[in-house]
Amino acid sequence: MPNIKSFYVTVLSQALSPCEEFLAAGTNFGNVNIFNIKSLYAEDEQGPRESLTLPQKCFSVSTKPLQAITSLNDNLLVGGKNCIEAFSWNQLVLPQNSDEKVKPCWKVDLRLPTDFGTKETVDCMINGENSTFVACGDNNIHHVDLEYGKVKQTFSGHTDFIHSMSLVGNQLSSASEDGTVCIWDTRKSKPNHVITPHLESKLNRPHLGKWVGAVAMNEDWLVCGGGPHLGLYHLRSLTMSRVLLEEDVHGVNNVMFHEDNIIVGVDGPFVYQCLFSGDITVKMPTSPLRVYSICLQKKDANKLLFVGGSGGDIDICTSSKLQDQVIRCLS
């Protein structure tokens, strides 16, 4: 009989190993699940064994949900309670030993103010050069120097939970529950520009609220959405160019640029791919009833897309088969 907790697993974050052959998934129960993607797709006359759809390793990091995990160099960085913990991928990819406890190889104390636990969370992370930008429960973004293991700069400007960040060169953008997208020069502690999508009449959806759940940038464009519709902004002029997915009724939880496409995970059972023109090229149903996390291979020619959210299932999607396989996280 399955553990009753397994019916309530939510996949909140994902990261690939440097070789992109292993996937780490963080859950609402504070666990990290490690999947062997290479073995799942290894040629086998009898097809992939059912056991391969389960994680080869599952270990607890925190009592709180793991909202933020990322890979940097040879380590998996996990946002814990008031800290960042690093786990060596060389150890994580080894088969599970029941007697062996997975331990971090190093740890950075963020020294956040405490407020009954609400300010001690790590809600979002994005990598810089030998550093990481960490959005925390104090509504600030902290730039952490990983070589010296300390916070070297704090960015203040949001007044509520920070859902998402994107980094291009020295330009950082962040999307928040407060209804704004801040654009920062990483050499300064205050935002250079603030976008307020819900004030755009074409984007505003009052019944869903003003929160902005996702943001992504490239050299020329910024795309963001949440309660408001997904909007495409010209980055230099900061003017709203186009409304995307105008017919979709869900909030926006994830967005990323990929080549000439924009990949979008919504607060419902769909992942979209659309062009800059607004034309939808793919509307893919997903196993998760709400999509909270998307992760894309960049090295592999197949470029598998991993989609996680409510429920423990992670869809593995290919350009030819869309939902190709499903793997499942443990509680």
Image: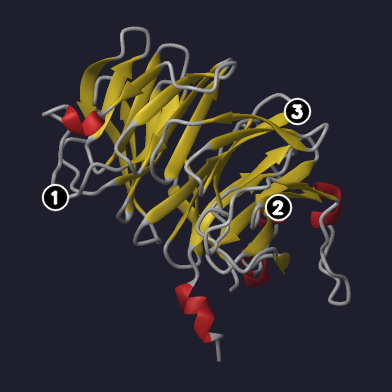
Q: Secondary structure at mark 1?
A: loop
Residue assigned mark 1:
207
Viewer-closest of 84 and 59: 84
Determine the image quadrant of residue 175.
top left
Which quarter shows the N terminus? bottom right
Q: Residue at x 37, y 13 (%)?
A: 235
Which quarter shows the C terminus? bottom right
Question: Earlier along the polypeptide chain: callout 2 or callout 3?
Answer: 2
Q: Secondary structure at mark 3?
A: loop
Whether tag 1 and tag 2 are in contact, CB under 8 A, the answer is: no
Viewer-closest of 56 and 51: 56
Kind of residue at disc 3: Asn
Q: CA distance from mark 1 to mark 2?
A: 47 Å
Question: Earlier along the polypeptide chain: callout 1 or callout 2?
Answer: 2
Residue assigned mark 2:
42
Viewer-closest of 7 and 189: 189
Q: Residue at x 61, y 65 (%)?
A: 30
Q: Position of residue 308 (x, y in %)?
A: 48, 55
Residue 130: numbered disc: 3
Q: Position of residue 257 (x, y in %)?
A: 44, 27
Determine the image quadrant of residue 276.
top left
Kind of residue at disc 2: Ala
Kind of residue at disc 1: His
Q: Is residue 117 above or below residue 147?
A: below
Residue that extends furthest to the bottom in the rendered view of this protein: 1
